[in-house]
Amino acid sequence: MVELEGGIRQVTLPLPTRPGHVHSYLLPGSDGWIVVDTGVGLPDAKETWRAELERAGGPVSAIFVTHFHPDHIGAAADLHELTGAPVYQGTLDYAQCELVWGNPAWSERLLDWFQLHGAPPDVTGELVGQSSIYRPFIRYQRDPVLMREGERLDGWELVAAPGHADGQLCLLKDGVLVAADHLLARITPTVGLWPASRPDPLADFLAALDRTVELDPRIALPGHGDLIDDPPARARELQEHHRLRLEETVEALDRERTQTGYELSLALFGDDLKPASRRFAIAESLSHVERLVNEGIARRHELGATVTYTAA
Ligand SMILES: [Zn+2]
């Protein structure tokens, strides 16, 4: 546990997949700690949190989940059982959480969707039955207190940060932005198009980055990696990264030859990726090409059982 400015504590929890760790934050509130994000629901999550909270001292008054990805929400129910504190989560984010983690048919839906975008069996095969493998580590809290952007939690303003997850919410107070996966120091947060996600997540993300520049926080506390001491500059860097990625996507498109999201991902991310990384590459390629469709630069063709794209 690391003590940061204003009495905020950073708790770094292990993550079995890359990047190997996730940060939670303890924010000092009027009636105790506000815990932001929970880590994955590993079998020893409760013991880990018991030890961390003993070290911090004092009660927990609220548990806040920024977004429903397993490394942020996974141990929410454990923390609730341990502390009795209510869990707070964004309205849209909780709806997507239920749709994905509360839905036994989700992996089939994902499988259909990847097939629609041209993914071959070696990329989709692992998806079969995957939800039953992950489900035990995602112990989200049912019926949390639902929150919306602009509302406050013990003096912290909730700021919408869609893109990485449609319903992601950050917290802002006194120039400190608890940023979750909206801003990361060295990693580019993934921005993918997924089944049932908002139609143009990259547009959402670029607008949310503009908002970060406007809000001009002094420091951002990310979900992974180093603290960010110039958040507006990092927001501009991420916008530039996507501007270049969009240019590459334009170059990859052809006027005549139709390409699926899978084929575009080969052009943009190379052909040497493991299935799980390939699925993210497809989702990222789709978020970029859909941005271009909305700009009138690319065209989507929905013929039969496949979606393809060409240059407009
Ligand atoms: Zn994360």
Image (cartoon, rainbow, N blue to C red):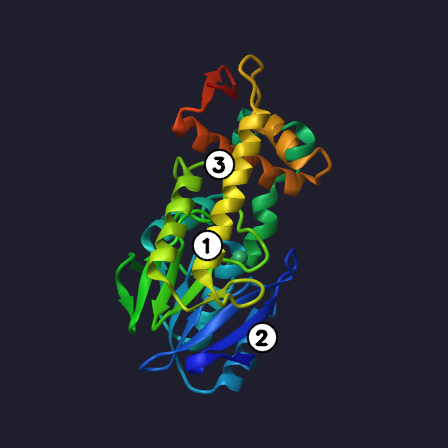
Secondary-structure class at tag 2: helix
In the displayed image of the protein, which residue is found farthest to the right? Answer: 272
Q: Position of residue 306 (x, y in %)?
A: 53, 20
Q: CA distance from mark 3 to mark 1?
A: 18 Å
Determine the residue positioned at 45% across, 20% down. Answer: 299
Q: Position of residue 215 (x, y in %)?
A: 34, 60
Horizontal side of 227 relative to 199 (left or right) equals: right
Q: CA distance from mark 2 to mark 3?
A: 37 Å
Q: Position of residue 59 (x, y in %)?
A: 40, 83
* Type of amino acid at the residue the image marks with label 2: Thr
**Marked residue nearer the N-terminal end (2 or 3):** 2
Q: Which residue is mark 1?
A: 235
Q: Which residue is mark 2?
A: 48
Secondary-structure class at tag 3: helix
Q: CA distance from mark 1 to mark 2?
A: 33 Å
**Marked residue nearer the N-terminal end (3 or 1):** 1
Horizontal side of 20 relative to 152 (left or right) equals: right
* Type of amino acid at the residue the image marks with label 3: Ser
- In this view, the residue in front, 69 or 198, is 198
Instruction: From the image, state whether disc 1 or disc 2 is nearer to you.
Output: 1
Beta carbon of the mark 2 residue lies under 8 A of ligand 1: no
Q: Which residue is mark 3?
A: 287
Determine the residue positioned at 49% across, 84% down. Answer: 56
Q: The N terminus is located in which quarter?
A: bottom right
* Type of amino acid at the residue the image marks with label 1: Ala
